Image: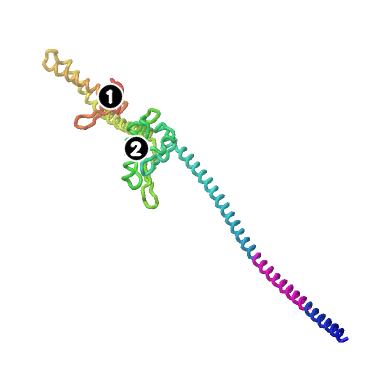
Amino acid sequence: MPGLVWQNGGNRSWGGKRMQLEWYIFASAFIALFVGLGWSFWHIQTLRQKLSKLKQTLKGQQDQLKSAAEKSNKSETGSIQTTTRLRKYLRLLDTLINTIPNPIFFKDENGVFQGCNEAFSGQILGNIRNDIIGKKRQDLPSTVPSALVSFFRRAELSSRHQEESHTFEVEVLCTDGREKEFLVSIANVSDDKDQFLGSVAVMQDLTEKNKAARERLEKEKLEGVLETAGAVCHEMNQPLQAICGYTGLLNTRLDENDPSFSYITKINTQTDRIAAITRKLQNITRYEALEYADGSTIIDIHKASQIGAGTPSKK
């Protein structure tokens, strides 16, 4: 009986301890589960925060990349537009230069042709522009007249010794075989620091203008000569007629054997010469000058008059 009691008491004691152990295990598991859930929740929140930051950072980088791409596209578009506008401007400038009838060319500081219009390349040199650009005057074809090469040399020297612009006239044998007179205007080109960069030249054809000026001057001279000749003839005719009349009367009264008769004949001969000169003065049609050894100039009556005039001389 006592053994049974102990067994029952022992069973109860063991059963209680077992229940305590199970409760402890359950409580520990619950606490561990709670702690694990809490840690997991905290870890998830931490990960969410990091993920959110990463998303924000990624979004910022994406925005930056997008902005950079947009700027790049705008810059590229702007560059393309600028290049397109520049090309249009250069084409327009080239068209304008070639539209100008006056020959134009420009060189750099070393005397190398950097550009010209078709009037210069065609009328003056007889070459296409591509055969001129990038060359010096020494590199031009041997067919270029020596006078033109001398003109280039003079233009280069003048451009280096002049501060601004200067002009001079030059005669150039053009490709059409005509020798034309040009007024050349050369202007130096400098940068913002006044460093010499080159020169630009414009050639104006003065051939017809100078010809008209010479013709106008000749006409004015001729008018002056005609006025003078008319006045001389008017003033000389009356005394000349009187001399001729008196010598004629003397010839009728003198015998041929009279010593004075030969003098009267000589006077008649000279008066006839004077009369011929006055007739030439009355028939002057152009201005012709005769130069003496001392440098003085008088009217060449014989060449200027239609009477007995030969081929007009060139002045």
Q: Residues within 10 Å of mark 2 (few under 14, many from 20)?
A: some
Main SS, magenta region, reads helix
What residue did someone put label 1 on?
A: 303
- Give how far across and how far down residue 36 sits, in percent: 71, 72
Q: Which residue is mark 2?
A: 152
**Number of the label disc, if any, that sits on residue 106:** none
> Is the residue 245 above or below the residue 204 in the image?
above
Residue range in magenta is 23-51
Residue 51: image quadrant is bottom right
Instruction: Examine the image and state in which quarter residue 252 appears.
Output: top left
Q: Secondary structure at mark 1?
A: helix
Q: Residue at x 47, y 40 (%)?
A: 94
- Viewer-proximal residue, 89 or 288? 89
Magenta stretch: includes residue 291: no
User: Of circles 2 and 1, which is in front?
Assistant: 2
Disc 1 packing (10 Å; few <14; some 14–19; many ≥20): many
Where residue 103 sits: x, y (%)? Answer: 41, 37
